[in-house]
Amino acid sequence: MDMYSTKARSTPQKTLIMILELALLLIAAQIMFGPWSAQISNMLGWAAISPSPARRYVIMVFSIVIFVRYIFTMFYMIKRRIPWSEAFTIPFAFALYYLGFAMLVLPAAAPLGLIDYLGIALFAFGCWLNTTSEMQRDRFKRDPNNKGKLFTSGLFAWSMHINFFGDILWVAGYAIISQNIWAALIVLFIFCFFVFFNVPKLDAYLANRYGEEFKAYALHTKRLVPLVW
């Protein structure tokens, strides 16, 4: 995982990611509030409903929040090199949220209820968990006295990848608001991606870089889900 150890501003790549994600947000708005809403619903055999029920607004707000959070993280906290290949693939990954949930919410006609407010709370908590943990680690890394040290405190004391766990929670919040059983597949996909791909690869990198310090940390800390695994 050389990309984690190579530092660079990668401003052109980050700018491209921002532009592509803005385009995806505009497409999501067209899907939920524009003429594409009826066209996609007819194509998928879904009954036509009110063009802008409250839960579509919630999904749109969720997507805007995720966009703002990621742009902040990318320009302020990400110091590693972002290759051009990643600059093109990252927006496609976010399309799963922006466009996927925009389409899945189309047949949902029920007004917001208690379970939806729990979904909103889950989304907010997941965002807080991810952003706060990343900011705690960023402050630690900015201190010259911590150079070459592994960050194991703050929220990362609860889970080695607490930031990824936050991602799973806010995706689950999206799924609840969409009121579509197929949305659970997106949550399952993200969970499996972290468990079987991202977490093992990142652990291998950390073990190679921090050696015994990482082994001690892994021995006493859950990998992804606090108190569980």
Image (cartoon, rainbow, N blue to C red):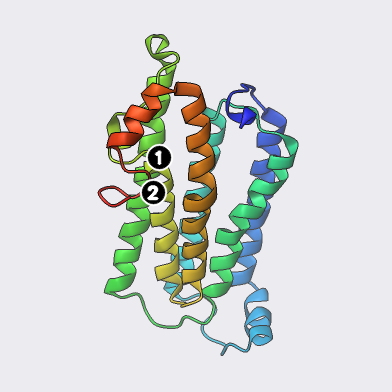
Decide: is 194 above or below 219.
below
Residue 131's disc number = 1
Decide: is 162 above or below 101.
above
Measuring 45% from the left and 83% from the top, which residue is drawn there? 109
Q: Secondary structure at mark 1?
A: helix
Q: Nearer the viewer, residue 128 or 221?
A: 221
First of labels 1, 2 by sequence position: 1
- Quarter in which the N terminus is drawn: top right
Place residue 218 in its image quadrant: top left
Q: Secondary structure at mark 2?
A: helix
Cβ–Cβ under 8 Å for marks 1 and 2: yes
Q: Residues within 10 Å of mark 2 (few under 14, many from 20)?
A: many
As drawn, which residue projects farthest toward the right?
Answer: 84
Decide: is 125 above or below 101.
above
Q: Which residue is mark 2?
A: 166
Q: In screen coordinates, is 208 left or right of 85?
A: left
Place residue 137 in its image quadrant: top left
Residue depth check, mark 1 versus mark 2: number of the one nearer the observer: 2
User: In the image, residue 61 lies at what x, y percent?
Assistant: 47, 58
Measuring 48% from the left and 44% from the top, which residue is drawn there? 199
Residue 57 visible somewhere in the drawing: yes
As drawn, which residue projects farthest toward the top?
Answer: 145
Q: Nearer the viewer, residue 47 or 132?
A: 132
The three-letter code of the residue at mark 1 reads Thr
Residue 72 visible somewhere in the drawing: no
The three-letter code of the residue at mark 2 reads Gly
- The Cα atoms of the two marked residues, 1 and 2, are separated by 8 Å
User: In the image, residue 197 lies at what x, y percent?
Assistant: 54, 49
Residue 182's disc number = none
Q: In screen coordinates, is 182 left or right of 40?
A: left
